[in-house]
Image (cartoon, rainbow, N blue to C red):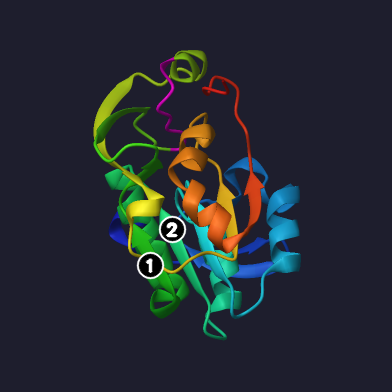
Amino acid sequence: FNHQKRIIPRHHHVAGSRIRSYELINSHTIDESVMLNEILDECSSDDIVYDIGANIGTYTLTLGQITSRGDGQIIAFEPVFSTYNRLLANIEAERITDSVQVLNIAASDVDQPKKMYTDQKDRYSTMSLERASKIGLSEEISMTAAIIDNIDIPEPTIMKIDTEGHEIEVLRGSANILESASPTLYLEPHEGGDYT
């Protein structure tokens, strides 16, 4: 209700930072995220960060506080349209719109629509039917998928990938950028993805 009506962008404490969001940011103990804390230690105001699997923006909002102080930028990838809209609202609440670009696509190894499984709350979404079955995601939606190497965006210095079982496809679709830019890569692998 708070998010839909945009009543109060609440303040949240995340990994030592204070961010504004309409969401309940700490819904899955993000303060304890080793990955977020390591990225925060490395990130500077001039970094180009890809937040692949941005969801409602915990990483984008937190790291955006750093990149907005310099020439850096966050490029957030969020394919689920309702979550994408929530992410945009949170970025506006945090007042970092000038240093964040949000793409309503799924980073993948193909340039074509793909199926995704989600639920009413949009907390978790996955392209893996096996993973969707295990965590009880029953709603099937279609979204745009794209190869990162084919998108005209600045090359990253840091890449964070958390795509609920679609990580290998993301890596395949960004092979050229990974080779040319050699970004620091942070990857959260998930059971049920294609790891062959």
Secondary structure of residue under mark 2: strand
Please state which of residues 46 and 139 is positioned toward the viewer in this rendering. 46
Which residue appears at 48% of the width and 39% of the height?
Answer: 172
Position of residue 36 in the picture relative to residue 87 (left or right): right
Residue 29 visible in image: yes
Badge 2 crowding class, 10 Å Cα cut-off, few under 14, some 14 to 19, many 20 or more, is many
**Dominant secondary structure (helix, strand or loop) of the stretch shown in magenta:** loop
The amino acid beneath tag 2 is: Ala
Which residue appears at 73% of the width and 67% of the height?
Answer: 42
The amino acid beneath tag 1 is: Gln
Please state which of residues 79 and 113 is positioned toward the viewer in this rendering. 113
Which region shows up in magenta? Answer: 123-129
Q: Are marks 1 and 2 in contact (CB under 8 Å)?
A: yes
| In this view, 21 is above or below 142 | below
Q: Earlier in the sequence, mark 1 or mark 2?
A: 2
Residue 11 visible in image: no
Q: Can you identify the residue that label 1 sits on? A: 101
Which residue appears at 57% of the width and 54% of the height?
Answer: 179
Quarter of the picture containing the C terminus is top right
Please state which of residues 142 and 12 is positioned toward the viewer in this rendering. 142
Image mark count: 2
Which residue appears at 70% of the width and 65% of the height?
Answer: 40
Quadrant of the rendered image containing residue 188? top right
Position of residue 153 in the picture relative to residue 57 (left or right): left
| In this view, 166 is above or below 78 | above
| In this view, 2 is above or below 161 | below
Residue at mark 1 to residue at mark 2: CA–CA distance: 6 Å
Mark on residue 177? none
Q: Can you identify the residue that label 2 sits on? A: 76
- Residue 69 x %, y %: 57, 85
